Structure formats: C-alpha cells, structure tokens
Image (cartoon, coloured by chain):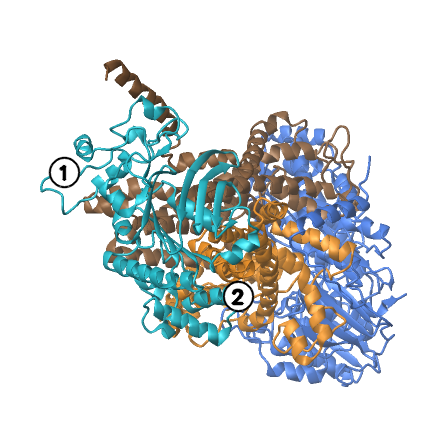
Amino acid sequence: MSVATKTDKIQRLAELTAVKETSTGASLWREALRRLRHSKMAIVGAVIIALFLVLAIVGPYVAPYSPTAQTWRNEVFPNRGEFVGARGENWFGLDHLGRDVFSRMLVGARQTLLVGVVATLIGLIIGFLIGGVSGAAATLGGDAGKRVDSVIMRFIDMMLALPSLLLAVSIAAVMGQSLTTVMIAVGVVQIPVFARLLRGAMLAQGGADYVLAARSLGVRKRRIVVSQIVPNSLSPVIVQATLSLATAIIEAAALSYLGLGNPDPAIPEWGVMLTQAQRFFDNAPMMAVYPAVGIIITALGFTLLGEAMREALDPKLKG
Amino acid sequence: MLRLVVRRLLQLIPTLLGLSVLLFLWLDRLPGGPASAILGEKATEAEVARINRALGLDQPVYVQYWRFLKRIAELDLGTSTQTGQPVWDEFVLRFPATVELSLLAILIAVAVGVPLGYFAARKRGGWLDVTAVSGSLVGICIPVFFLALILKGVFAVELGIFPSYGRQDTGIDATSVTGFAVLDGVLTGEFDASWDAITHLILPSIALASIPLAVIVRMTRASVLEVQDEDYVRTAEAKGLKRSVVRGRHVLRNAMLPVVTAVGLLTGSLLSGAVLTESVFAFGGIGSFIRQAIDARDYPVLVGFIMFIALVYVLINLLVDLAYSLIDPRVRVH
Amino acid sequence: MRIIKSRAARAITAAVAVGLIATGCSSERDNKSKDGGEKDTFVFAGAGDPGSLDPALASDGETFRVTRQAFEALLEHESGGTKLVGGLAETWSSNDKGTVWTFNLRKGVKFHDGEAFNAAAVCANYDHWFNWTGTYQSSAVSYYWQTIMGGFAKNEDKETPEANYKSCTAKDEHTAVIEVKEPSANLPGGFSLNALAIHSPKAIEEYKKQDASAKGDAITYPKYSQEAGTVAGTGPYKIVKWNKGNKEVTLERFDDYWGEKAKIKNLVFRTIDTEEGRRQALQAGDIDGYDLVAPADVETLKKEGYVVPTRGVFNLFYVGMSQEANKALKKKEVRQAIAQSIDKENLVKTQLPEGGKVADQFMPDTIAGYSKNVKKYPFDTAAAKNLLKKAGEEKLKVTFCYPTEVTRPYMPAPQDLFELMKADLEKAGITVTPKAMKWAPDYIDATEAGSCDLHMLGWTGDFNDGYNFIGTWFAGYDKQWGFKDKKVFDAVNAGSKMGKAEERVAAYQKANEVIMDYLPGVPVSSSPPAIAFAKNVNPPNVSPLTQEVFSEASFK
Amino acid sequence: MSLLTVDELTVTFGGRGRKESRAVDGVSFEVDQGQVVGLVGESGCGKSVTSLALMGLLPDKGVTVGGRAEFDGTDLFTMSRSARRDLRGSKMAMIFQDPLSSLNPVVPVGVQVTEILERHRGMKGEAARKEAAHLLDRVGIPDPTRRLKEYPHQLSGGMRQRALIAMAVACAPRMLIADEPTTALDVTIQAQILELLKELVDQEGTALLMITHDLGVVAGLCDQVNVLYAGRVVESAGRRELFAHPTHPYAHGLLGSIPRLDAPRGEPLSPIRGSINDRIAWADGCAFAPRCDRYEMGCLTGTPQLTEPRAAGHQVRCVNPVLDDAKAEEVTA
C-alpha cells in the first residue's frame, strides 16, 4: 500500500481516538471540583458566603449611620417596652439604646466573620499539629510511636469528655473577658475535632500501598509523612474547617448569650446583638430576628459548602 | 466481652487522674475565690482573706490536690461552696434532671431522625429528601438558646400548651424516690406526676434534640445511600427477595451501624446544649449548675462534676462499643 | 414613632418556630388543667435559691425573702414603709448613751413548734449567736451579726472585729434588756434585721448540737438549716418543705400566729434565674408573682393587666472612682467633669423602672439624713469639657468596669447603663476602655480592690439609718475609692456614735453635704426593683426594703 | 428454540447532566437448554453489564436498556417488575464475582440461604433450615448445620463462594449466570468451584451463562463462546472451533497472549497493544482498530457486520479477518 494511504490512515485513526482521551484519568480533586460545580448545595453555600464576605468588607463603608452613636436615644424607652421599628431613616429600626440596627448589622458582619475565622484557625492549626504528630507516630513510629499516639489520644479524649461550652466558659473565666478570649475559647473547643480527623485520615493512609512501597524503597519516614501521608489526608480536614466556621459563629453567639461576649457591647457583633435583643423579644422581636437570621444564614452558607465538599470528596457518594 | 469492659474501666483511672491534675492547674489559674462570690457587695479584703483561709485556699495548689486525692480515696467529693452541701448530694439532686432531658432529647432525635433520613435516601432528590436535608442543615445552624427561646415563647407563653420552666408543677407534690421525676411517678403510681414531668421535659428536650436530630438524619441518609450500592444488596435483589426484606434485613440493618456510633457520641456531647437549654427553661440540672459553679468559683463542685461527666462520657462510649459488637458480628469480642 | 405591638411578636415567634421545629416537634398536649378549683397556693418566683433556712446564717435577699415569712425580729419596718415599728417587741427604749436597749415583748406569741415566746427566748438567741465558734465566726456565715454586734465571746481569728455585744438579760417574763459596749449607728435598726430574728429556744438547742464545719474545701451549712423540720420562728407561715431539686421552698399558714393570720394557705417560693424566665412563667400562669422584674417588662405586664405595684426607693446606684487607679481622678475638676458629663435624666427616663429617681447624693431621699442642700452637678457636656481643659486633662483616658450576668435592685441592666454612660463620657472627650467582668467574684474583687478607674455599683439599705449607706463607703480609707480625706471621714463618723436619732439625722445631712462637696464619686440614681403579680392577686404592701410580708397577699 | 435469546442488547449510562457512555453496544447471542455459553473479554468490555441487564439488576435511574432479551418465550424487558422479581432467584439465578462483599456481613449464612427458600419455595422454619443445610452440603460445605449459624466473615473464601452458589441453585433455576465466579479465589479453589458448577449443570440440565476474562475457564467449561469487545460480540463459535481457528484479530490476540505448552520453545508471547480505553465508537468503525495490526481504511468506515468467513456458525465481525493461521502468526509476531 502507498505511503499516502498509510499516513492518512493514521491521521484518521488519531482524530477518532483523540475524542476518547478527554474522559480518562481525572484526579480526585479535579473530579471533586467538577462535582462541586454541579451541586446545588455548593452553589447556594458559595453564594451566601460570597455575599457575607462582601458585607464584611464593604459593610462599614456603606453603613448609613455610625453603628455606635446613640443618635435616637431619647426615642426608645426600654423601661416602658417602647421601641422604634423599621422606618424611613432606620430601615431595621432602632435598638434599645437608640442606635440604627441596619448599620449595626452591616458593620457587625465583619466582627462576626473575624471571630469565626480566627477561632477556626486556632482550632485548625493546633489540632492539625497534635493530630499530625499523633498520626505520624502511630503510622510510622513503631511501638514507641504507638505509645506516644495513645497518650496524645487519651489527652484528646479528655478534651472531648468536657462539654465544649463548659470548656469555653472556663477558658473565658481564666482569661478574663475579651474578644480574643471568645476566639480562643471557641477555637480550643475545635482542637480535638481536627486532631482526631487528621490522625484518623493519616492512619488510613498509613496502611495504603504507596506508603508501604515508599517505605520498602527506603524513603525517609519524615519525607513519607510530609510529602505523602499528610497531603493525602487533607481533604477531610479542609471539609471540617469549612463546617467549623459555621459552628464557631454559633458557639460565639452562645458564649455571648452566657455573657462572655465582646466586653465592649457598643461594637456590633451579631451574637452580642442577638443576646441583647432577646431581652426585649416581646416588644421588639425584629431586633432579635435580624441578627438571629444573619447568624443562621451565614452558618448555613458555610455548612452547605462544607457538606457539598464532603460529598464531592467522598468517593463512596459518587454519582 | 467482659475483658473489654474491665480493660476500659482500668484505662479510665489514668484518664481521670490526668483530668483531675489538669483541673487543679486550671482552678489555680482562676482569678478570685468563692468568698467574694458568697458576700457580693458586702465583701471586703479582710473578709475574703479570712474565708479563703478557712477553706484552705491560701495553701499551694499541690497541697490542695493532695487533700483532694485523700478525700477521693475516702469517696468524699467535698462540699459545694455555693450551697454548703456535699457535692455528692448536689449531684444526686441534679443529675437525674439532665439525664431525663438528654435521654428524651436523644430519643426524639432517633425516633424522628432515622426514619426521616431513611426515606430521604430512598427517594433521593425527592421533596422529602430536599426538605429533610435542608431542614437538618438549618437545624444545625440555629443557636440552641434562640430555638429554646422561640419554643418557649410560642408553646409555653403564647399557646400555653406546655409549662414554661422547671421540672414539675407546684401543684403536684410528687414523692421522690429515685430523683427521676418521670420514673418516680410510675414507681409511686402518681401517674399525673409522671405526665406533669413529661410535659415539663418536652420543650427543653426538643430544643436540645435539634442538633442531634439534624446529625442523625444526615448520617442515616448518607449511610443508607452507601449501603444501597453494596454487593450484598445486589445479591439480595438477585435472589428476587421481597422489597421489604431487602430493605429491612439487608439495607437498613447495615446502614444502622455508623448511626449507632453517632448516637453514642451525640449523647456524650449533649451536655453542652444542656447548659443553654437548662438555663433558658430554668431546668435544675447539672448543666446550669456547673455554669453557676464556674461563676461562683465552686471548686469542689467543678472538680467533682467534671470528673463525673468524664466518667459518664467514657461509659457511654463503652456502651456504644458493646452495642456495636452486638449488632455487627465482625467486631464481636471473642 | 411606631411601637411594635406584641401581636407582631406573636406572629413572628409563631412563624419562625413553626419553621424551625418542623422537623422536631411532637404535638403533645397537656391535658392537666392548671390550678383547677379553689386556689390555696401562692407561688412566688425569686432569682436565686435561698442559702439556708436559718436567717442568722444568711446575708442575701433571696434567703431573707423566704425566712422573713417564718421568722420575726424584735423590731420591724412598718408594712410598706421604712419607719421602724415594734415587732416581737411592742415597744423599746434605750438609755441616752444608746448602750442599753430595753424591749417590752409582745404577749401570747407562740413559736411554730409550740414553744412560748418570752424574754428568755430572746436572750437564748442572742447568746447563741454571741457564743458562736468555728466556722460560724466566718463572715460568710455570720455577716450580719458581725456588722451589728461585732465579734464573738471568743474570737478565733485575729481579724474578727471586737465584740460590741455585752449581754442579754431577761428582766421579767416579757422584758428583755440587751446591752452593748459602744453606741452604734446600727442600733436600733439592727434589731429589725431578719438575720437577728428570734428562733424557738427548743430549736436553738437543736442548732447547738450541730456545727457548721469547714471540712473539705467549703463551709458546710449545718443540716438543720438545709431541711425543714427543725427551724421554728413565730411568723405567719411555717416552713414545711425545701425541695432543692425542684428549686422550691413550701410554707404553710401558721394557725396560732399572734397577728392577722395569712390569707392564703400555702406559700411557695421558686427559683427562676433569668428575667425573661420569670416573666414568661408569670404570663404562662405558672407562678402568681415574681421579684426583680426587668424594667422593659413593667409596662408590657401592666398593659397585659398584671398587677405591678411600684416600690419606694431604698437603694443607691453610683459610679465609683478609684483615685489610686488613675491619678487624674485626684483632681476635683476631673471628678466634677465626669459627674457633669453623665446624662442621669436620660438614664432614669429610658432605662430605670417606674419610680426611679435621679440621685444627687449618696443616699436615697427616703432615708433620714437626706439633705436638700447638697452641691449639685447638672448634666452639661460643655462645662465638663471646660473643666477637663482647666485640669489639663483634655486627653483623659479611663478604664470603666461593668458587671455581666447580673441584675441588682439598683442596677437593672448594667450593660445598658454602662453603654449609655460610656457614650456620655466619650461625648465629653474622655476615652473609655470598657472592662466587662463576671459579677462574682471577678467584678466584686476588682472594684473592692480599686483596680478600675471607674466602676458602677450600688447599695440597698438594710434598715432606715443613714450610716448604713454613707458609713459603708466613707467611714475611712477604702481601696474602692482610694482617697484619704479627714474632713469627709470625720463628718461621716460624727453621727455614728450619737445615741439620739434626731442628732444623728442632722449629722448625716451635714455629712452628705461634705461628701458631695468633695465628690468621691457620682451618685446616679435610686430605682425601686420592680415586682409583679398575677391578675387575680391582691398583692401585699410592697416595701422599699423589699421586705414584703406575703401573709397580706390574697386572691381576688 | 433456545432458552435465552439476546438480540441487539444496548445499555447506555449517563443522562443526569453527565455525558452518555455506551457500555453494551448491540450484543446478540443465544443460550440453549443445559448449554454452557461463555461471554469472554477483557474487563470493561461490557460482560458484567450484560449479565446485570439480563437479571434486571441495573439501577432504574441513569441507565437505558435497549434491544430484546427473550427468556423462555417472554421478553424480560417488557415484563412487569414484580414478575421479574418472581423470576429472579427462582428461574434465573446469578453468582457474583466477590463472594465476601456479595454476602451480607451482619446476617448469618443460614438466614441468607433460607430467605430465598421462604420467598420462592414457600418453606418455613425448620423445613427451610433443613433444606438450607442440605443445599450447603450439596455444594460441598462441611458441617453445614454449624455453618448455617455462622457469619460470612467466619467462612473461607471458597466456602463463601459455595454458599453463594448454594443460594443460586436453591430453587433449581432454568438458567444460571456466573459473573467471574472464580476470579476472587485462588487457583486450587477455582478448580473446585468450576467442578461444582459443571456437575450442577450436568445434573440439573441448567443452562449456564459463564462470564469471564479467563480463557482457561472457557476452555474447561463452555460449549459455545462469544468474544466481546467494547460492548459488541466480535466473534462467536463453538469452543473447539474458536480455540483452533481464532479469526478475529482480537480473539486471535487473546489466544496468542496466553502461554501454550504445545507452542515451540522460545517463541515469544504476542500481547495486544494498548488498553480497551483507546478505542473508537462502533458507529465510526471497528472499535478494535486502534490496537489492531491488520486494520486498513475499510475498518474505519462504519460498523463491520458479522460474517462467517471460515465455517458455518463461526461468526466474525471483521473486515480483514485472520483466515490463514500461518500468516496470522507472522503478522502478530
């Protein structure tokens, strides 16, 4: 047969086969991303979070009034249960000290976010370290490592045994009342969660074939942990982090309900606002509803995204 | 089986010891003492000093710890500085309340959560599924105390269906046998008392149940979805078994395994919620009492109770493991 | 201005709730009809559990509210007033020096345990207290005895004050004579304290058998004080049950009461620690009344037809300044600037319950010794600024502490009050650093150690004597204020040693003028703690000293 | 007329947003009474999907089944769900690949056997248990009465597979589908299981559809063999005929890629290049072309038809089949 025919035979073949290539071999993460894009949960969650972030960033600049100025303090009479609801100049009405609730909501978003993020970071970082050490020890540390691991885990169990809120309250009691305290208190509560997660994932990975392979090839243990096990154990931690943002925001609200919120109640933060407002629930329910809804929706946003990520990353829930 | 129990109980000892040490270090860091808590505005430095001396709080922490260990050895938990009563009595007084509350809460969570999650999974993407999932997601995101407030506002105050606070009506003088109001009523035949106690429990327990409920719904759902694709389910189908059999014996039974563990852990963690719910409903249980104890620097109570909670927590986990080994032959302890 | 109707509240709560609990709610119904039939039980909610059933061991209002119904002291305040009147003693007198007090006792009085009341009984009580040992000598247990009578027969702690009590003698069946070493401003007022109420001698014998021990890490109250049965007084009600688990104390009408018998058979005190908890309980019909109503709720409850009588004021709310914590406060201009920058009127108008008054001295106007012509410091931000400039403190920075998790009779919503005052101070150009602390112990410790530049605190009078107010603060150097000023101290103490009441009053008026001239702090307001009752209740006379006697209450 | 006639069976996955993929693309074959038919091909060629489609075990959502499958005179695909249910396990039974995951871990083996008897043979309690024991005994499980009480994880791999077989044959089905029944087992057990199957088929006259990638199994068991490639039968013949004259380059390659004792020393094995992933849609031409040494333009113009280039009943789907064995050797070499 002639050269010509041979070549275009190959070309024809090439273009026909080419079509198939795309569908093959997508990494776990790319797969996950693809599924995320198709998940309604993820989209809704992402949108909420986006809005919240925008609010947190621009809120203070677009707020119509100062959130702390008691401009209308002579118009509200908490002692007579007389409040000012939504009206032209104050879209969300006034709070119990004659401040503009709408402005406070706008500015409050940032504080709320701040608390959530920092708290989660605290829990994440410390928990990550503890869990990492423990996991590494358990997977590659031999018997000594196993002992180390079990000690650490005993400690973590102790932390878990204490009801998270009491832990938080007592931390606040020790450190005195401040925004930092709230963050730390909420963060510390998250530590065991992250630690356990990472350790669990690492143990699972520890048994994996590629780890055995790497070890049999004599790769240094630290290297295996850092470059193999940990990266492969990350996904559940990342998911948890997203979910924790939600819990952090709620826990923070709970703390301020227990009277441990920001010591300067003038600074608007949704949890504090809710706590203050619920005292006047009968007379001015909306005053409590605004921050409550704010908290719920935000938390919902993070939860949705987190759950969607979990589903996307969990091979079992494919399809 | 027995060996497992014994081993766990032995493991408990170092845990508790470690915990108690941590506690004491923590207490040592707590500013202020019980004295000023007792005296309020009336406190003056001298008074405070005198009281603290009387309580031996002026001694270094390790001395106090040693005293504590000695007391524990004599099975004496010490005395509450708030109420001046033996910690043990205070405990016997309040623990039943929290137990009742938690049990009912978890009961609601399971009774509603499991079926909901199951049918949600069966009709994946259906309206039930969507509502169940979104509902449970929202459930997690509502601050417990807010939910409790709303529940109380609506069902106790506005509609007056349920009592708004406390464990028992004043009208009823129920004879207390075990301290478990509901149980006592049954034991003594004062069923009105039982009923009264139950009505007092409902609102708080619903509030408390919100989070476990949400978790259980989603767990069950996920678990069922997973099991549905298992080979053995396909085998069952291949045998042409009736739907009911396939679902009951082959899907549900396997799907329940993770849920059982979850329920255990949730029960252990209920106390946090209890702190809030109990204070909203003035429900005299452990949760609210420990909070007061922290505010009032009531060291003996704090140590005693927290140790006990740790104990309970471990025991619950033990129970879970035992239950697990019963329903899953693979982990049966030989 | 539009007021949100509580109809809106209903709608929203309902809507939200239905949404929220769509998953959770089992629609159980409570078939048991509430209070069916003739109502013979009156339920009153307090904010905290009583500490003991023996008032002698207590120092807090929650305890006294209960014990006051079952125990009576030699003297009492007139129902609903602040005037001292005879209690178990019909009349009383003292020598000019004020060291020998003679009480002509009421006849035909019986104790709950059937014992007869007489001079011997009175002395049995006073001697019992005087001879207290061990933990009983801790001020945590015997605070009021020590305030009124000083120390004990044998003081065991060097820091325990010297005993001022000398003796009690039964001159005859119905005449008791109590002698003290030094005249004291606390007498005769002190004799009216429920902490010094008279117990049945039989009970006292029982008490003596038991000891309050400090074994372990805490003061253990004696058993008798923790369960009904032993304690026995003369009051219109007798304590029959203390159900701690249910947080309730049950009392029952004492049919042999010497005076007018209680109108309602059973009286129950319950504990609901949150304001809205108590309010909702009342609205839900679970209780017939409660104390410490949140000011915000007063109008609401009135609108809904509840009975909300207004108490007279008998307390004082002030902003304390610790001159050692912040040197700037040593300058009078600065203190005056702070005083003038606070808008007390607005505070009272918007925050305090009905009946609240702006205070212009460290004593409410219901106390004998209140002075009409003290120096006034009206609200005037501009003036305050000038004063600061004069003092060279335009850039004044202060830390301002406030308590969380607490409401006091004089301070209904500390955080709100704090926020308003903070805003005021800032308007005057002062930089305020807020410090929030748990009421007990953190806040108490901090304020009493004078570690806050500014703090807010107050005082509720125990009995009608000026010294009970100004004496607690300005009798001498006190870290809380951190100043030494002989002029002030002398003025305050002048009255305390005088036997004659009239002389004392004059002295107190003078003292108030001196104090307000020196201006150690800013008296802000006096406000009656609000109390509320169900629609179908004829309430007892409400008392400025929050000393309601529930035997006066009845159902419509 | 044959027991099972499969005609142009197609199974398409996808829909629900994801792009469609055709797992089975027009498979046709027949199974007669008591006949053992092999369905051969590498993993991913659609064997298992075919079997699931026939059993009606494919999920209802996201899958579309086309073509006809006539079992005992009735069309499986038009039949009602409940009728299908009654058919499964009684007339048509299946044995799966992984015995461990195919048994319910938390239900005793006994129950898993008796439940099928209760369902299809209306047996109850003791009777059912006896029969179950008998069945286990029949499939060669020692001490059956004890085993009945045990859980799957307590049995050995071989025993599990035997148990599965016991369930499959519990109702003496007309037809048995075995999907790679031996791949999860080690060699000695494999042989025993195959033995067992063979003997069951002989005794009962059950038809057996053997799905495997293992030509050894085929050689040992099957009367008729269908070679599947990318969801289509590319060659179909009697066992001997096929092994003697593999005519489709793929089949030829398959046979060439297994070591043969009768092959001359030193002759290299001739594996097939590439994997089943690099293929083209049947619509465009021969899906095997990319891996085939013999393809030419002709292969790439539309679906090749089944022809009988060599002998009657030996169907081949190829434009350029291997007719002369010698030549074939040299090409593949």
Instruction: Count the numbered circles shown.
Output: 2
In the orientation shown, which residue stands out farthest toward the right? C556
What x and y, as percent, mark residue C365?
80, 51
The N terminus of chain C lies in which quarter of the figure?
Answer: top right
Residue found at x 50% / y 67%: D121
Answer yes or no: is residue A301 visible.
Answer: yes
Residue C197 at least partly seen: no
Give the colour in which the image draws chain B: orange
Mark 2 secondary-structure assignment:
helix
> Mark 2, chain letter?
B
Q: Nearer the viewer, residue C426 or A229?
A: A229
For label 1, count other residues whose C-alpha is less than 10 Å away and answer few (under 14), some (14-19) or many (20+).
few
- Distance, label 2 to label 1, CA atoms, is 83 Å
The colour with which the image depicts chain C is blue
Image x and y of residue C440, in percent: 59, 56
Which of the numbered marks, if any, corresponds to residue D268?
1
The chain letter corresponding to brown is: A
Identify the chain of the residue marked 1, using the numbered disc in the image.
Answer: D
Q: Which mark is residue B150?
A: none
Chain in cyan (letter): D
Residue on which disc 2 sits? B301
Q: Amino acid at mark 1?
A: Pro
Between disc 2 and disc 1, the foreground one is 1
Circles 2, 1 touching at the beta carbon (< 8 Å): no
SS of the residue under disc 1: loop
For the residues tagged 2 and 1, is the chain the same?
Answer: no
Please identify the quadrant where the C terminus of chain C is shown: bottom right
Q: Which residue is at the front of the view, D157 or C5? A: D157
Residue nearer the viewer, B331 or A172: B331
Instruction: Determine whether A31 is above or below B3 in the image.
Output: above
Amino acid identity at mark 2: Val
- Quadrant of residue C222 within the rendered picture: bottom right
